Amino acid sequence: MILRKKLPFLLSLILAFALVRAPCLAHAALISASPQDGATVPSGEVVIQLRFNSRIDSKLSRLTLLKAADQSVVQPLETSPVSEGLRARAPDLQSGAYTLEWQILSLDGHLTQGRLNFRVER
């Protein structure tokens, strides 16, 4: 009888714990990017900004910019007060197609990576 009275409370407690813990276990996902995937930007300096849906460890994250299959440059990251994003500057980009590869470590310990393609035109 006592167990029957406590069962709804225990189930509610388990459900509440599961709902609170669920966002903590998800991988960080990209929610916005500049330049956007498929965008065309003017030549010159390009500011790269990526924003994620959860906090990341920017010290263990990286951005790599590729212009051709054999050319890649790891972009130094700027320190940012936003802990959910990465920011870098790519100076003096010439016309052509570029691929931005990113790799981040979310605070839950999961490694996430992806790529964006954009064009630079005069």
Image (cartoon, rainbow, N blue to C red):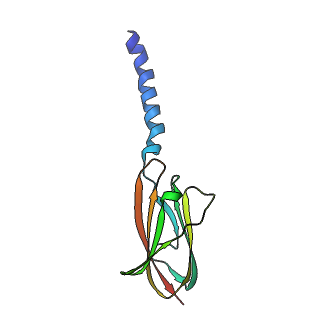
Residue at image location 48% in from the left, 38% down from the top: 20
> Residue 96: x, y in percent?
45, 86
Looking at the image, residue 73 sits to the left or right of residue 85; the answer is left
> Residue 101: x, y in percent?
43, 70
Residue at image location 42% in from the left, 29% down from the top: 14
Residue in the foreground of this view, choosing between 62 and 45:
62
Residue at image location 38% in from the left, 14% down from the top: 4
Looking at the image, residue 67 sits to the left or right of residue 81; the answer is left
Residue in the foreground of this view, choosing between 25 and 9:
25
Residue at image location 42% in from the left, 14% down from the top: 5
> Residue 22: x, y in percent?
44, 42
> Residue 3: x, y in percent?
38, 13
Looking at the image, residue 55 sits to the left or right of residue 103; the answer is right
Quarter the C terminus occupies: bottom right
Q: Quadrant of residue 89?
A: bottom right
Quarter the N terminus occupies: top left
Q: Quadrant of residue 46?
A: bottom right
Count every numbered label the image shows and give the total: 0
* Vertical position of residue 27 compared to residue 120: above or below: above
